[in-house]
Amino acid sequence: MIKLVLDTNVIVSALSSRSVYHWLIQLVLDEKVYLSVSDEIVLEYEEVLKIKYTHFVATNFLAALKELPNVYFTKVYFRWNLIGDADDNKFVDCYVSAGADILITQDSDFRVLKTTPFPKVIIMNLSQFENYWRGNGE
């Protein structure tokens, strides 16, 4: 199975069952992919989901993540500081610490990673990952 790290903007975009990207959340819930998160990432998910959705939605989604056997809570021991926006580095740090395969984000700040030789981080946006998944994952 493929191991993913999901930026918060991806969770926000895909969480609603009405979203065209909800299939990604369904992949996680159906245990078809691994998801790696860190404590920092979970805290950001919670904070943003409470604003974008509701406290109820945020709480239930995070409770589901904690129960799923394909969600791995990753301890980050090293900060790579590869992105100019310090708040985004938590996703890269989790990716490297977890040995993830793909980091999915809608944030253009991550593009710098395409030219970073080490550590090599594979990033995709939702559309790119959908094409990848439809071609390789299913």
Image (cartoon, grey):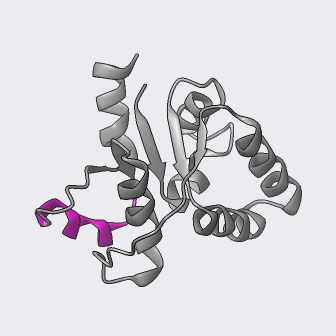
Q: Quadrant of residue 29?
A: top right
- Residue under the image location 58 percent in, 52 percent down: 11
**60 vs 92: above or below:** above
Tell me the quarter of the image containing the N terminus.
Answer: top left
Q: Which residues are magenta?
A: 106-115
Locate residue 112 relative to residue 42 in the image: left or right. left
Residue nearer the viewer, 36 or 87:
36
**Where 43 sits versus 7, above or below?**
below
Residue at image coords 52%, 47%: 36
> Where residue 65 sits: x, y (%)?
70, 43
Question: Please, which residue is most extreme toward the top here?
Answer: 138
Q: Is residue 73 above or below residue 20?
A: below
Residue 113 lies within the magenta run: yes
Does residue 78 appear left or right of residue 45 in this picture?
A: left
Expressed as whole percent of the image width and height from the top left, the position of residue 16 reads 68, 44
- Mark count: 0
Residue drawn where x is 30% and y is 77% of the image: 83
Quarter of the picture containing the C terminus is top left
Principal secondary structure, stretch drawn in magenta: helix
Q: Is residue 65 left or right of residue 77?
A: right
Asked whether residue 132 is drawn in magenta, I would say no
